[in-house]
Amino acid sequence: MKKCLITGITGQDGAYLAEFLLKKNYQVHGLKRRSSLFNTDRIDHLYQDPHVENRNLHLHYGDMTDSTNLIRLIQEIQPDEIYNLAAMSHVAVSFETPEYTANADGIGTLRILDAVRLLGLEKKTRIYQASTSELYGKVQEVPQSETTPFYPRSPYAVAKMYAYWITVNYREAYGMFACNGILFNHESPIRGETFVTRKITRAASKIALGLQDKVYLGNLDAKRDWGHAKDYVRMMWMILQADEAEDWVIATGKTTTVRDFVRMSFAEAGIELEFKGEGVDEKGYVVACNDPKYQIEKGTEVVAVDPRYFRPTEVDLLIGDPSKANNKLGWVPKYQLQDLVKDMMTSDLKLMQKDTYLKEGGYRIMNYFE
Ligand code: NDP
Ligand code: GDR
């Protein structure tokens, strides 16, 4: 039985990857942070009671900023594969917490690589590093491939650039099987609520059900190459099963504006939006909609731009070229953007419907401080 360690197992990708690897009969070890509230929602369905013998999922407390903890865990587990997914992954937040982001996302990667080296596991343990299309930042060429130069545009991207190169360096210096997956944006029903896609699908669902009036967004002109997380975690595994350690771009090859993602999400709830203006207006602009089913009057403003969500430096256009992954590993995404939007909207409409039932039943969120 193969053993793997997933850092960031409580995140979107960690949860899908853990499920995928358990199905492949791996013994899965996951690093989770101590938190004052439960933070294992996404993997609770995979949880196995510690009293059960021969269980395949093991969770360990730890942190990417704590070398001794990482060294001890890797020594105990002796993993065949490490998937380093843990990171402060929010680009906008990295402008607020640049030093911590560098520590967790940049030096954190070094800590994993060096632990493997110190423990003499260079020839045993294969390492996957969660690199990102944010490395491309300011547009140099499109579509972006493994040979496109990097130009990071946020503290997050700069930290990930260090992580990218230290992974390449340890591969070349010590012959380690360490690979970067340069993944373009990938989303799902369990995407973090503050990333734009999930913010949109949650808001569209709430607005459709009359639980919210309006959503405030930032730059609607940004273009992203959005795929489904399920397709992308499969590729993480394929990267570590390849004959040679290499770096890979994972993307759909198609790009869409945030505005069109908004349009598609509301349409999925049966609401047609009419944009009053195109382009970013500092004062914000609104869209109106008219759908008798949801009794939203024509002219109601349901989306507005709030400059507080603009970033000091923005990544305007991402579109990846996944030909290497297509040709060499036979990876082809199963989900198109429309399928992704449908999947997210179906899930969020169900989730928000629960709130409607609670409201109708006279229940409300408990206020502990009343
Ligand atoms: P999430 O934000 O959903 O998950 C991040 C995970 O990292 C969570 O489990 C989080 O724990 C954990 N984490 C954060 N900081 C630390 C720390 N200091 N020590 C230990 N664990 C920590 O991200 P995704 O699942 O979307 O992304 C996975 C990885 O892939 C990240 O590295 C991200 O930067 C990268 N990436 C993501 C892309 C995407 O579109 N999703 C695209 C390209 C790269 P907790 O739950 O406690 O917060
Ligand atoms: P990104 O994802 O920065 O690409 O990083 P995010 O969904 O946060 O932003 C995508 C684009 O949407 C614009 N935007 C908004 N973004 C957020 N979060 N909230 C808003 O209200 C809003 N309005 C407009 C942003 O300006 C941006 O252009 C994600 C993360 O998962 C990273 O960890 C990963 O490395 C990259 O994708 C690839």
Image (cartoon, rainbow, N blue to C red):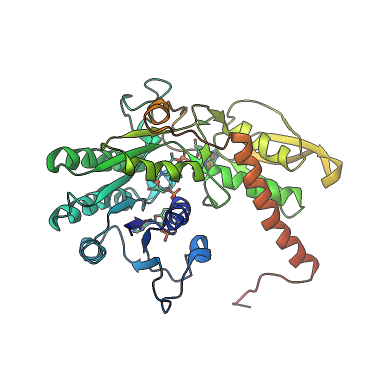
306 vs 108, nearest the viewer: 108
Q: Position of residue 197 (x, y in %)?
A: 57, 42
Whether residue 328 is situated above or below residue 89 in the rendered picture: above
Query: Residue 278 is drawn in which quadrant?
Result: top right
Side of 98 where 190 appears, left or right: right
Q: Residue 262 versus residue 71: which sits nearer the camera?
A: 71
Q: Residue at x 24, y 53 (%)?
A: 112
Say which quadrant the N terminus sits in: bottom left
Residue ranking furthest to the right: 292
Judge left or right: residue 148 versus residue 214: left
Residue, far front: 1
Is residue 216 rendered to the left or right of residue 116? right
x then y, percent, for residue 267? 72, 37
Q: Nearer the viewer, residue 323 or 212?
A: 323
Q: Position of residue 141 (x, y in %)?
A: 39, 20
Picture quarter containing residue 299?
top right
